[in-house]
Image (cartoon, coloured by chain):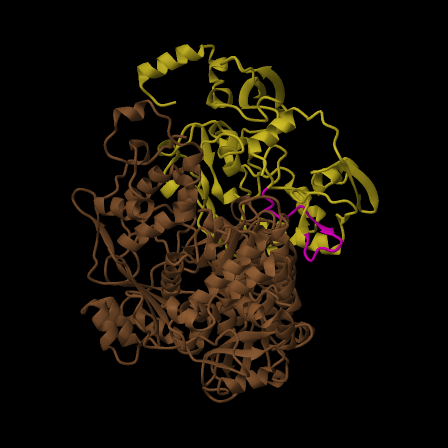
Amino acid sequence: MDIKLLDAEATPEERQAVDARLGEPHAAWYGTQARTTRELHVAFGGKDQRDRRHLLLPALQALQERIGWISEGGFNYVCERLTVPPAEAWGVATFYMMLSTQPRPKRVLHVCDDIACRAKGAKALCDELTGQHGGPLPHGIGKGDGHAAGHAGNGAAPGPHSLARRDSAGRIVIDDSHGAWTTSPCLGLCDVAPAALYIEAGPTVVERSLGSVDGDFAMGLLGGGAEPDDVLASVGPAKETQSTQNTQTTAKYHTVTGCLGEPRLLKRIGVVNPTSLTAYQMGDGYEALEKAFELGPEGVIAELNAAKLLGRGGAAFPTGRKWDAVRQQEATPKYIICNADESEPGTFKDRVLLTGDPFAIIEAMTIGAYAAGCTRGYVYIRGEYPLGAQRMQHAIKQARAIGLLGPKIMKRDFSFDIEVRRGAGAYICGEETAIFESIEGKRGEPRNKPPFPVSHGVFGKPTIVNNVETLANVIPIILGGGAAAAKIGTEQSAGTRLFCMSGHVARPGVYEVPMGTTLGELMELAGGVSGSGKLQCALLGGAAGAFVRPDEMNLRLTHEDTRAAGVTLGSGVVVAFDDTVDMLDMIHRIAKFFRDESCGQCVPCRVGTVRQQEALHRIAAKKPHGSVQDELALLEEIGVAMKDGSICGLGQTAYAAVESAIKRLNLYPV
Amino acid sequence: MTSPHLQLVQLARPSTKPKVMVELTVDGKSVSVPEGSTILNACQALGIDIPTLCWLETLKPVNVCRVCVVEVEGARVLVPSCSRTVEPGMKVKTRNKRVDLTRKLVLEMLASSVDLSTTPGMSDMLAEYDAKPERFGECETVAQPVKVDNNLYIRDYAKCILCYKCVEACGDDHQNTFAIAVAGRGFDAHISTEFAVDLPTSACVYCGNCIAVCPTGALMSKREWDMREAGEWDESIQTSTDTVCPFCGVGCTLTLHVQDGEIVKATSPLDHDITVGNLCIKGRFGWRHVQTGQSAEQMSADRANQSTSL
């Protein structure tokens, strides 16, 4: 297929960035600047080229990381290299919020203003930045909007500093002396709120997750008076939580972890060096894989079934059944995906596992691959987790080096390898079918089910998708036996579970407790209510979860008890709000979250999330359309249509938290 | 996955293999349909009316508009009848309070955000489900200026319900030109060329197959749009006549829509086994010479002399 490209040319730096990700082009057809005579006699393209389509997102990310934004020329070059029609690539580039198709300075600070950070002063931080530096960069592109730089040529974004202009030759020139900032949905750093993600594009991209960010520190980063490293090192109140420059760097900050009883999932966190395979093996590392080989595929699945392991991503599907369903598929190749796109507001447990125990994830994926007959694995990590991605990549490399990944693992007739894929700012890509689309290099639009992933997953092949925490459960189950694992917790909710405690609790962090622990005990474990000391309510399960009241501290955290109470465990989120928090503002943020993160594919979610947000604002502004009662009835109908009519879980749960605020908290008295 | 082309070929030339029949119940009525059929196919076999917007028999179902949802016993949420394949013993309800509520809300959401004034059958649909889009009050819409950047067709995205049909027709369902795609996200999602460049700069080949599948009139031939703007467009007095396109040897059926003795539009029937509704630039737009009395070659020569664009 030949494609029509725009006229813009990539700069040498852009070509270099893309070539570093895709390899050198081997023909003018794919972007070499000189054509050989042989090329006139050889056919190019075809299946080989189509099979490279999945590299579109990594190639666009390469430009973003190197240049700081995706210019027309760089974009053209990616399309040429991969033979992707530019309109399609444009659809992909404009879908992911961490990719910018507008000119941007190299340094961008993504400031989280989501619920957990909001409870800890994120709004004031954003106001301060707006006052001192100028407004945030806009998100994405509007309707009918093309490209500020490419055609209109202004590239103006809010702020005192003009971001881009054109020189006399018409080239876009960006003033990199100042950084820019933008607001961000939950960054998964809720324990160190208010949090931010600092990204500095360049030959070696600098990505840092930052906690306890204050105005001075943020202004220091944006002002660029010092090298970013110096700023990071010299500023007092801000703690550097993660560093991506060097695998050997020990994080200066550790997420608080704690547990009731024996830790099963957190036992290596903060204890075993996550960058050393030797350290992992000195414990009981890779014993589970050996035992899995002894048990055989059916044996492994039987243990998981005996352990009654349910998926920890939110849907609670039996893991053993999922693995068995893939095992029984005839189509090959089969895939296993570790869903590390943890983006549910208030969730950060997977980040702790990825950064603190990466080898366990690899071992668990290898066991899953062995049990179900998968030959290839992907770890899809949200773009906002640089250290997690780096640790995983490092761990995979180490495991591959000594034959624990690759052909003939442990000298058996079993080959399996894993690739890390990074997200680029889209909550929806944590949906199990959207993750396939994203890995295939497309917009993260969920697929209609059936057909289910076990038969039609990534690249249309049988695929296991498991959450990080679910995989972390596999190792202790195989080592200790399924029956023993099932004894922990309750009859219907077996095992331990990680909870992400944030907001107004004294010791925010990740806590491992047996299922059946009460909410009160969990709060106690995290040091009780902080802030004013008086709990107003807590959000349980994330933005797709529900609010619980202070009088519900006896709620046992199990699937059956939460279901009976009309709430959900979701992804193990508990965000506590003291009585000083403006809950209407929190509800508005949640409504905005769903509106921003809707992929836009189906009508109930695309329009419903907007109509929901509008109705909530009308009530808050005391200008209801009709009476407040009318508005609540309308919200209920919108909610039902979103739940019944949407393609995926995002739309289906977009009303959940709002509904619980209305019905359980009585936040909107009539 | 079967390629869309294969599906189309199958559509055009039914397989001679005997088909396994699947029996299911729709609204209490039993029906047998070939394996692989959708619930919508089963409903059509029974003569049950299901509203659709993003579905078209010549395109892969994308199930995004959600107006065709039905209730399937045992399913947690409503299912899109246009894409869900039938299973033996399935029990389907096409109309009840639950189904009607979601259909009504979907229609209200669309009608409150999109200009549906040129969507055929929309007023009946809104009435059927008692949809009252005004109950959302003042609300955000997709209103925007119409894009007129060439002489053949216009794009009025204020009328776009994002049904993906044009993208499919331009892409691997039909034309394989890939000039447009869905860009942006959420309520800001929209159909766009790369960097929103105008059509002459894009990969568009002006086959107009996107116009043929557009359900709302967001894509319209310039001629029709001009006539509508001037208040001259009147479908009630138009006649349509089938003929064969004279431009090449393929022999596409052309349906000429004539108003007041002048051709105002050319289409091709969806059930035509060569075109499945598609044409090329010449078939779709190259009919003006018929009314000028000049041959296409003469017009082309004249145009070259005047060096004006098409």
Q: Spot the yellow chain and give its letter.
A: B
Position of B11 relative to A522 (above/below): above
Answer left or right for B132 relative to B47. Answer: left
Residue A140 or residue A416, whichever sits in front? A416
Quadrant assignment, res A604: bottom right
Quadrant into which the N terminus of chain A falls: top left
Residue lying furthest right: B29
Position of B302 relative to A23 (above/below): above
Quadrant into which the C terminus of chain A falls: bottom right
Residue beneath the point at 67% across and 54% down: B102
Colour assignment, chain A: brown
Answer left or right for B303 relative to A368. Answer: left
Q: Position of residue B257 (x, y in %)?
A: 58, 22
Residue beneath the point at 45% across and 28% down: B206
On whether residue B65 falls in the magenta region, the answer is yes
Magenta-drawn segment = B62-78
Residue A271 or residue B101, whichever sits in front? A271
Task: Give the overall secondary structure of the magenta segment.
Answer: loop
